Image (tube, rainbow, N blue to C red):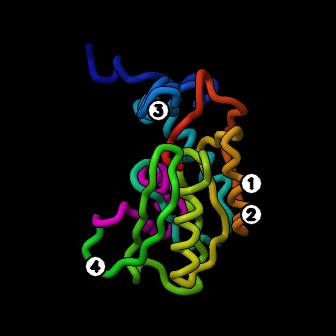
Amino acid sequence: MTAAASVPSAPADWADLIRDVPDFPKPGVVFKDITPLLASPAGFAAVVDELVARAPERIDVVVGMEARGFIFGAPVALRLGAAFVPIRKAGKLPAEVITASYDLEYGTETLAVHADAVRPGARVLIVDDVLATGGTVGATAELVRRLGAELVAVTVVLELDFLHGREKLAARGIDQLTALRSTASATGGSAAADA
């Protein structure tokens, strides 16, 4: 069998390539696994195309969060002719950083960005794979604003509506949110995706 023969083809809707994994990372959680989507060149390209098509005009910087935000954010930045800035977990960046902490559905996390990563006034688009509780996006937006940049919009591949992340972000003044797809309920428990 050739390598190409094992690559999943894109279904009519790329969202069908996102796999639900029950009881991961803990019992009662249904994890949204994007690896089958990434294994499909046509499916992955379709997602990137859609993210680019929905991006606001004149974006200077695309920010993506560790780790799956890197996967989608970097190609979007490249296609938009914008810089890409990775937001990392604490302790992973070598120079001076600023940090923001947030609660996950199953723990607490701290994100960091280099203090000189984004120039003041830059127009920033945040890109991530999944919006769940809004914690990751909220902390990232805080970092962007503390750097003096303008948060223009947030775009995610999948929104888990039932976790009310959009409402939590709106309460923090983050209301320019676009989700390519959304899901109204979890299958067999709550869902997780570190977002």
Q: Residues within 10 Å of mark 2 (few under 14, many from 20)?
A: few
CA gap, disc 1 and disc 3: 24 Å
Tell me which numbered mark, 1 or 3, is placed earlier along the sequence: 3
Q: Nearer the viewer, mark 3 or mark 2?
A: 2
Q: Please state which amino acid type lies under the numbered disc 4.
A: Ala
83 vs 11: above or below: below
Question: Within the magenta stretch, is there residue 6?
Answer: no
Q: Where is mark 4, residue-wise?
A: 95
Tell me which numbered mark, 4 or 2, is placed earlier along the sequence: 4
CA gap, disc 1 and disc 4: 34 Å
Pointers 2 and 1 in contact (C-beta within 8 Å): yes
* Rendering coords of residue 134 (x, y %): 61, 54
161 vs 119: above or below: above
CA gap, disc 4 and disc 2: 32 Å
Q: Nearer the viewer, mark 1 or mark 4?
A: 1
CA gap, disc 3 and disc 2: 28 Å
Q: Residue at x 70, y 56 (%)?
A: 168
Q: Quadrant of residue 113?
A: bottom left
Tell me which numbered mark, 4 or 3, is placed earlier along the sequence: 3
| Circle number at residue 167 | 1
Q: Secondary structure at mark 1?
A: helix
Residue 101 seen in the current view:
yes
Q: Secondary structure at mark 3?
A: strand
Q: Where is mark 2, residue-wise?
A: 171
Q: Please state which amino acid type lies under the numbered disc 1.
A: Glu
Question: Within the magenta stretch, is there residue 78?
Answer: yes
Q: Residues within 10 Å of mark 3 (few under 14, many from 20)?
A: some
